[in-house]
Image (tube, grey):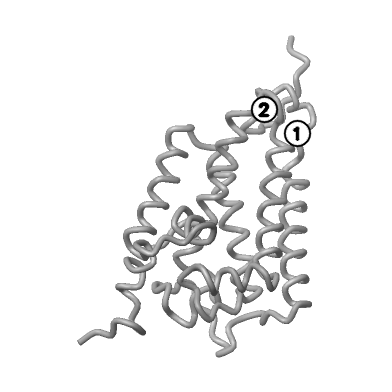
Amino acid sequence: MSNAPASGNPMSDAPLSRFALSRTAVLLWCLLGAAIIGVTLWSWGQPLVSRNGRILLWVGSIWSSENSQQVADWYSLSHAVQGVLVGLAGRALRRWIGFPVALAVVLVIGVGWEVVEHTDWVLNRFRAATIYQGYVGDTVLNAVCDYLFMLAGFFAAIAMPVWVGIGLALLLEVGSAVAARDSLVLTTVQLIHPVPVIAAWQDAINPRTHPAP
């Protein structure tokens, strides 16, 4: 008879699974992360919702003034991809780190990015090196939802077969790049070392610089 606990954890075959968290603990940690993001950005002056007062479930253009202000947009997919990648890494390293460590990593990345993204240095870098000229940061609503999309990607990746997780990440990344001309990889490249060809290709569908005839 095995002495291993029946945690029901998708990474329960890892040696560290004896430290598995209950579903309640996981939920509380995730909610704490959302609260930290919300309180921090609100205290820094980011609006709770869009300044026009509307709440939309989806914004389909990265050039819209409502981009990064509502519940979801094309960049929500990038956050989901981030979560999938962390989940896949956790799966690959599960025999050494276990689920609690993988969860801690995704929480730190998710919360840390939403906070760091709204520092003056990062905001100015986005404006200078990417297509986000005039970017003023996310609303609290959008930042918290981005964090939740990352968590959704993470939990999906640890629950589904690895090949499905890889396929999901590729689908989201390629779909965003094709439909919106931006994605996690493209944003990262342009943020670190802007490539003029990529910038021109992205700007070709910008209605402000290329209005429809």
Indicate whether 23 appears above or below 205. Answer: above
- Inspect the image, locate mark 2, and give the three-letter code of the amino acid beneath it: Ser
User: Outermost residue, top direction?
Assistant: 1
- Name the foreground residue: 78 vs 8: 78
According to the picture, the residue beneath numbered tag 2 turns out to be: 12
Residue at 57% over, 51% down: 152
The amino acid type, in three-letter code, at marker 1 is Ala
Q: CA distance from mark 2 to mark 1?
A: 8 Å
Q: Nearer the viewer, residue 16 or 174?
A: 174
Place of residue 1 in the rendered image (x, y in percent of width and height, measured from the top left): 74, 9
Which residue ends up furthest to the left in the rendered image? 213
Q: Where does the image place residue 170, in percent across and percent down from the top left?
A: 40, 45
Q: Picture quarter containing residue 99?
A: top right
Quadrant location of the C terminus in the rendered image: bottom left
CB atoms at circles 2 and 1 under 8 Å apart?
yes
- Residue 55 x %, y %: 54, 80
Identify the secondary structure beneath mark 2: loop
In the rendered view, tell whether residue 199 sits above or below residue 66. Answer: above
Residue at the (70%, 70%) spot, across then down: 119
Numbered badge on residue 20 = 1
Compared with 50, 85 (above or below) is: above
Label 2 neighbour load within 10 Å: few <14, some 14-19, many 20+: many
The residue at the far bottom in this view is 52
Task: Pinpoint residue 103: horizontal percent, then vertical percent.
Answer: 69, 43
What count of labels does the image hold? 2
**Direction from residue 70 to residue 28 in the image, left or right:** right
